[in-house]
Image: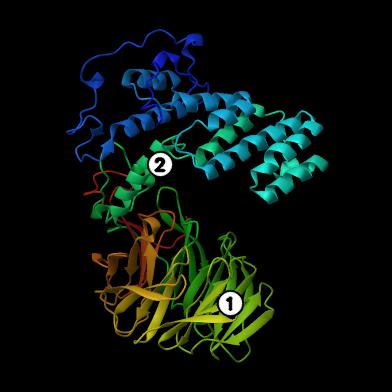
Amino acid sequence: MGGVDDNEPPLKRVRVPTVESGSLLKNSPFSEPVISLGGPMARPLASEGKEDIIGSKGVIKKVEFVRIITKALYSLGYERSGAALEDESGIYLHSSVVNLFRKQVLDGYWDESLVTLRKIDHLDENILKSASFLILEQKFFELLGKNRIIDAVKMLRSEITPLGIKRERVHELSGCIVSSSKLALLGFANVGTETANSRMKLLEELQKLFPPTVMIPERRLEHLVEQALNVQRDACYFHNSLDSTLSLYTDHQCGKEQIPSQTTQVLFGHHDEVWFLQFSNNGKYLASSSSDGSVIIWEVHEDGRISLKHKLTGHDKPVIMVAWRPDDCQLLSCGMEEVVRRWDVISGECLHVYEKSGLGLISCAWFPDGKQLLCGVTDQNISLWDLDGKELESWKGLRATRTSDIAVTKDGKWIISMCRETAISLLDREAKREHLIEEEQTITTFSLSKHDKFLLVNLLNQEIHLWSIVGEPMLIAKYKGHKRSRLVIRSCFGGYEQAFVASGSEDSQVYIWHRAGGDLIRALPGHAGAVNCVSWNPSNHHMLASASDDHTIRVWGLNRVNLKRKDAGYHCNGVVHQCNGNRK
């Protein structure tokens, strides 16, 4: 199979002039003999015990290995090298029968290709019928492209229909005879002018039908290498670097130095405790809110420096949270049992104030379209508003407390909110169904993951629970170590593929755990008061920010002293910088 058992002399084998085997070398300018370079690099591959097995583990079949390399060489356009490998190894990418079949398909010898198809080993009747259908379908479309309508009708009736498969497709083909516009719908509008391309696509479709021993799948070597790199990356416990750092030259392994652990900047701008902060979705801004009633929009520069862009005032009470619009052009801020304000990020202008007479708002969230917003109300309802402040809907759902988080999944399907002291509701309003996350302890806050797969739940008993919310909610991990006794402490996902969990703590430290393993990785000292909230930059895996009762925000980055290699695009000299809140 694939040339292994074929004893025909190599010089008689047909090489098809395609991307992977365009090697009719007698017509090539590179037809001179291939000269061995000699030395260790030219020696045959070492085998372990048997000549047909290579590698130290004894699991790699030499024939498969060589054929896959040959396939890759042809795919990369190295036709002479592919041909030389075949000739020198005596292991051929395809058998002579398969080579002949490929050439007949590319040359449009349809009847001959159907005969040769029957000579290819290891093809059962179902494969033969499906492959014949594809070949005849191509022939049909090419006849239509040449305006040979009568011939196309005849072959549809006498060759395609008798196969007895894909009756719906046969009906579609007959429709193409009546209406040429249906050719475009079936993807064959240019079959007459792009014959070579359409025949190559036909070969690719045929290849998908055949066993891989007959025709090796496209990009097989690339797939195997990518798979190996993915396995190494997934096995790397501290992986927090870009995929560009993966290399074929060495096995991949990150250390703790890839986790933000060093203060790179301290931001001063609030005059009281900083209760909340959140990076924008694109990572270019950071918004913070304080018990002093102010909101600050900070700008994240390309070099990692952060400076004050706008200080927003107007709330009469402490601002307990902010929420970025999905496109990051606007920001919501929610006062404690007060109002929600909508701000323009570029100008800093307050665009609208949302309020309910006699009641206070205690949380806010955007709908994915950015045209509606949700607010938690002190009467334990959830209100849905449009941008102009019109209340569109209101329903029971919240508990009255200092804070009551709300989140909406990116498809707008699920609304997540606290419905009891110990329960979180996942409500599908359209389907009128609800899932519950029920805890034994009082829930203080929660955080939704980027891809809406997980929910971090902070509890009164100094634990953080990780729930899977795909399908029925399931508790999958617990994180311990941080301190919480009287304050609202928030946590977040972060790092590469959100592989880590970070949290504030009342002992003035930032805590970081491995999301899947649950192990505590870092405890970061530096603040002089309780750390209320943390946020990980979604576009810079090496940037973490924390908000504290000490009136400051700390920005954490990599420890450049111990870092052995640097990620492209991030530069820091390891010195702590301070920003006093003055606009730059």
Query: Looking at the image, is 553 positioned above or below residue 88?
Result: below
Residue at (59, 35) in percent of width and height: 202
Residue at (46, 57) in percent of width and height: 283
Residue at (41, 30) in percent of width and height: 2
Q: Which quadrant would residue 531 be assigned to in this image?
A: bottom left
Marked residue nearer the N-terminal end (2 or 1): 2
The answer to whether residue 239 of the structure is visible from this angle is no
Q: Nearer the viewer, residue 236 or 47?
A: 47
**Amino acid type at image mark 1:** Leu
Count of numbered badges drawn on the protein: 2
Query: Looking at the image, is 61 positioned above or below residue 165?
Result: above
What residue does disc 2 label? 223
Residue 101 location (% of width, % of height): 53, 27
Q: Nearer the viewer, residue 252 or 3?
A: 3
What residue does disc 1 label? 374
Spatial CA span between label 2 and label 1: 44 Å
